[in-house]
Image (cartoon, helix red, strand yellow):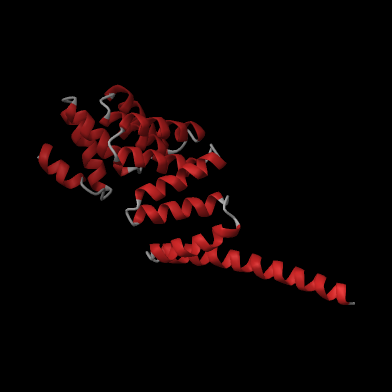
Amino acid sequence: MKLRSIFYLMILSTMLLACNDKDNAEIGNDFYSQGEYQKAIDSYNEYLKLKPSDEIILYNRGRAYEELGQYDKALRDFKKVIEIDPKNESALLSFGKSYFREKDYKNAAFQFEKAFKLNTSSSKSALLLARALHRDGQVEEAMEYYNIAISNDNKNGEAYMYRGALKIFLNQMSGGCSDIQKAKNMNTEEAESLYNQYCK
């Protein structure tokens, strides 16, 4: 009888711990969606004490660090996610963005290309790869990936805007302004000022 009671207590304790873990993860996600990034990190930290290899929560914590401008900590989380799952597209994109932010466009393009190869129908990956190539001076390759980004999603205003900017750089004014006009019609940030600067 005593052994049975101990057994039930152990099961109950395990269930309570599991519920608490789940609560910490969900609470962290709630805080994140409300813009309470430090509180989100605190909740994720509690969760990760018992499940340190949960790649979803590690990634979410990395994004929260990123929102707070704590890029080194964010990068550490993204790297850990990629170690756990080298095919995690979101972590590869975030890793690439950290290189892009540091103006290391070659390494940014390398990470974005890995993400794109995992999902060739992704407009976002193609756009980020195009932007890194564009900044690295690889204009033909950049144009190819801007085209892919638009082909994958013809409502990607950013892709139109940046492709338009590249066309203008290449003295293709008509095509460039047409792309920027499309981006402007989609209310893409910066498209109107770009249009006013080059196309009026």
Residue 199 in sight here: no
Establish if 4 lies above or below 193.
below
Number of numbered markers: 0
Where does residue 132 sit, x and y in percent of width and height? 31, 33
x 56%, y 42%: residue: 84
Place residue 131 in its image quadrant. Answer: top left
Where does residue 113 sit, x and y in percent of width and height? 42, 31
Q: Work out which residue is located at the far front of the displayed protein and give it.
A: 2
Where does residue 168 sit, x and y in percent of width and height? 18, 30
**Observer-nearest residue: 147 or 130?**
130
Is residue 156 toward the left or the right of residue 47 in the image? left
x 25%, y 47%: residue: 185
Residue 149 in sight here: yes
Q: Quadrant of the N terminus?
A: bottom right
**Observer-nearest residue: 145 or 93?**
93
Is residue 188 toward the left or the right of residue 93 in the image? left
Is residue 24 toward the left or the right of residue 135 in the image? right
**Observer-nearest residue: 195 or 166?**
166
Establish if 3 lies above or below 97.
below
x 34%, y 57%: residue: 68
Q: Work out which residue is located at the far right of the displayed protein and give it.
A: 1
Place residue 47 in its image quadrant. Answer: bottom right
x 40%, y 56%: residue: 64
Q: Quadrant of the C terminus?
A: top left
Where does residue 78 sit, x and y in percent of width and height? 46, 45
